[in-house]
Every structure is written in C-alpha cells, then in structure tokens.
Amino acid sequence: MTSNVGGLDRIARITAGVVLIGLAATGTVGVWGWIGIVPLATGLSGWCPAYLPFGLSTCKTR
C-alpha cells in the first residue's frame, strides 16, 4: 500500500472528516454526518482506495 494522498489533500480530508463527525455528534446534521469517518481515515492513512482504479495520486513524485 503506497501513499497516494498528498499534503493538501490530506489536510482537506482530515478537516472535512473532523467537521462532519463533529456536526453529527452534536446533532446538527443527521446520521449521514458519520460518513466523515471515511475522509478522516483516508487522510490519516495517506491512502485512498478510490484512487486506485483511476491511477490517481496527489502525492508529489520523487
């Protein structure tokens, strides 16, 4: 599993995930807000399985 999520992408995913989970936990949004677990997990791990079929990567090439 090589990293395919770059710096800005990771920050955006983590931020979106935390915001969605926070909104769901406070009842501001419905149960669907718990979907924030997905971007949070992919942001923290640095790997997104949805990028694989398309050959995408937001990581800088070395």
Image: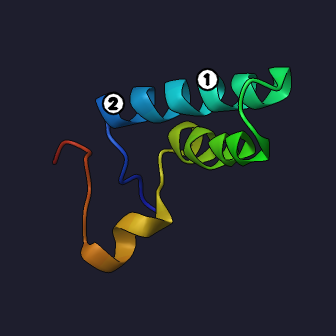
> Residue at the location (61% across, 38% down)?
40
Element type at marker 2?
helix
Q: Which mark is residue 19?
A: 1
Say what amino acid the circle numbered 2 marks: Gly
State whether residue 59 is above or below residue 22.
Answer: below
| Label placed on residue 52 | none
Among numbered discs 1 and 2, the one appearing first in the sequence: 2
Q: Quadrant of residue 53?
A: bottom left
- Of marks 1 and 2, the one in the foreground: 1
| Residue beneath the point at 74% across and 43% down | 34
Disc 1 is placed on an element classified as helix
Q: Quadrant of the C terminus?
A: top left
Which quarter of the picture shows residue 33? Answer: top right
Q: Are marks 1 and 2 in contact (CB under 8 Å)?
A: no
Q: Residue furthest left?
A: 61
* Residue bearing mark 2: 7
Q: Spot the residue most to the bottom.
A: 53
Percent coordinates x, y for residue 57 in the rendering = 26, 56
Count every numbered label the image shows and give the total.
2
Relative placement, left or right, of 18 versus 16 is: right
Q: Percent position (x, y) of residue 16?
A: 52, 30
Callout 1, which amino acid? Val
Looking at the image, is 56 positioned above or below residue 47?
below
